[in-house]
Image (spheres, rainbow, N blue to C red):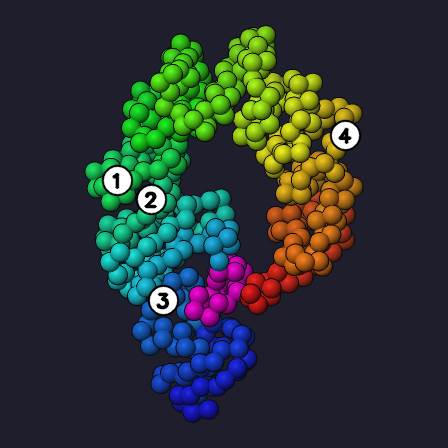
Amino acid sequence: MGSTGSCHEDIRTRDACGSVMPLKSLKRTKDSQPEELLCKYCSKLRKSNQYCGICKRIWHPPDDRDWVCCDGCNVWDGFMLNATTLRMSALSVVHVGQGSSHQVNGKGIQAAEPKSGSLVLIKGPTKQSFVGYDEAISLFDYFFNESQTLPNMLSCNLIIKAHCDQGSVDHALELYRHILLDGSLAPGIETYRILTKALVGAKRLDEACDVVRSMSRCDFAVYDILIRGFLDKGKFVRASQIFEELKGPNSKLPWRNYHKAIAIFNVSFMDYWFKQGKDEEAMEIFATLEHAELLNTISGNGVLKCLVEHGRKTEAWELFLDMIEICDSETVGIIMSKEGFFGEKTIPFERVRRTCYTRMIASLCQQGNMLEAEKLFADMFADVDGDDLLAGPDVSTFRAMINGYVKVGRVDDAIKTLNKMKISNLRKLSIHQAT
């Protein structure tokens, strides 16, 4: 092959990105080494001296192998480049508009000028992320203030939450008010949930009320945060006033969520009476709850959690059995949160939906009950060779099993499970690439 040329279906490993996928267009650059083989995308980046919008540097994957190397080549290096796994990864900047690329590391940012109107999505910092709160906020300032890139509400919500988690509620409110004044974006329900929770936590209840009243549409979860805030501060009368306003004929609650919302508010008052040592008043509220609302996972889980937390074993067990056909992973997490809470009672795992298996396996492994965990784990593989080729346990389920085996001293089984996880995920990867 000459200095510039192409090779159809060449499957040699690319020097830049490590891709071994057949690519129709291969190029060599004038300043490249004689035997250096680049794909079209990496060649373009090399010429422009830009950084890849996903990886830390263009030419080779980092040693920690937790980054996608090159989005132009669809190279899998630790994480697949798709929406689900990008949320799993610790990438702080997920997407940049066309014509813009950047490098983020501990030494700062190197970037080409982004085009006007392009989108940058900043992922909030987590315990596993490489970028802390301060760095995430700095990135937000860089893209949306210095580079005049148009943000979206999701990015703003993540930074508002970062400020709140740091205890800088005033900074969060400043950004919220700036969004309102600018008018190009509209705060959503998630914005109000974050701010209300932060203001209630800071005991700034009057300001929380102001924020809640400014919502364009009523959200029962936001009002529940506010009601619980007043109850926790001992202001029962004020909490009751808010509840009565929402329950009355002029309620702002959407009709489709009205009964669910009333049930959620009642749970907050149940919790309040239990904490006051007045179990009789709490159980009177429980008796007024409609059976249909108890069979809704949102309100039902709230009631179940309240009963479990306050030691009402009989009522909690009966409610769980009523919900078992429609329960979700949160329901299972609540019922299994206290080991031995239900004494000799056996949870009928066979009646629980498979979507809850991951949570059940994690709880069983934490308790060292590997026998039951193994049964559920094996059941998750039942359809792997059938029509559902992407079925089977996910990484978190495998990790729970591995940790469970280590906890009970079964190291060999932990290693076998680790190897099985590698095979399972490679298979899913190959199917994903093929489709």
Badge 3 or badge 2: first in the primary sequence = 3
Q: Any mark on residue 51, and which?
A: 3
Q: Disc 1 on helix, strand or loop?
A: helix
Against 35, residue 22 (above or below) is above
Residue at numbered disc 1: 179
Q: Amino acid at mark 1?
A: Ile
Q: Amino acid at mark 2?
A: Met
Badge 4 or badge 2: first in the primary sequence = 2
Which of discs 3 and 2 lies nearer the camera? The answer is 2
Q: Report, in whole angstroms, how far the alpha carbon at label 4 lies from the one at label 3.
A: 56 Å
The C terminus - image quarter? bottom right
Label 1–label 4 contact, CB within 8 A: no
Q: How many residues crowd mark 2 within 10 Å: few (<14), some (14–19), many (20+)?
A: some
- Horizontally, is 213 left or right of 3 in the view? left
Q: Amino acid at mark 3?
A: Tyr
Q: Residue at x 39, y 88 (%)?
A: 4
Against 359, residue 28 (above or below) is below
Q: Disc 3 on helix, strand or loop?
A: loop
Residue at numbered disc 2: 153
Q: Report, in whole angstroms, how far the alpha carbon at label 3 lies from the one at label 2.
A: 26 Å
Q: Which residues are magenta?
A: 61-81
